[in-house]
Image (cartoon, rainbow, N blue to C red):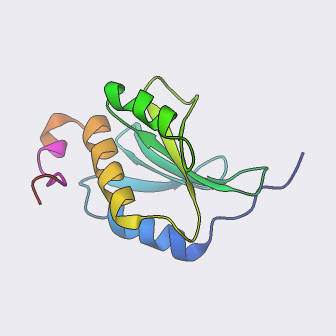
Amino acid sequence: MADRPDVPLAWVERLREIVARFPECEEYAAWTGVAWRVRQATVAHVFGGEDQLFRIRFFAEPDEVLAFEHLGAPYYRSDWGVNAVGILLDDGTDWEELAELLTDSYCLQAPRSLAEQVPRPAQA
């Protein structure tokens, strides 16, 4: 079994800045990498893979899942759940787009009362 690389700290810090805007979203050490959840629902999970690539998994509207799957790299459909998708992270990652996707993920996973407190990208 190949070792999994640690996610670069600069990337974890950028992700922390994004999720800090989400009410009751807490960071925790996942089985590998770092993850964030609201109450008991995971919002995102960033980790290094055995293939030495970095990924972040999150959740999308069911009708968007197929779009992610068909877009291809850096996007992918995850086997983590029916509406789980992800992005391969690298030096060319669009962090603004990722912030929007994580906002959507949070709003899908959070109780309605918390999700309503978060400005959606279309509202910003």
How far from the left and from the top, in percent, is residue 111? 22, 35
Residue at the location (11% across, 44% down)? Answer: 116
Question: Relative to residue 122, is residue 16 drawn left or right?
Answer: right
Q: Nearer the viewer, residue 81 or 61?
A: 61
User: Does 68 sit above or below residue 17?
Assistant: above
Q: Would you identify the image quadrant in which residue 20 lies?
A: bottom left
- Nearer the observer, 39 or 68: 68
In this view, 9 is above or below 62: below
What number of labels is visible? 0
Choose between 45 and 97: the one closer to the eye. 97
Which residue is painted at 31% across and 31% down in the image? Answer: 61
Q: Position of residue 64 (x, y in %)?
A: 35, 32
Whether residue 12 is situated above or below residue 45 in the rendered picture: below
* In this rendering, position of residue 118 left or right of residue 81: left
Which span is picked out in magenta?
Answer: 114-121
x, y (%) of residue 19?
34, 60
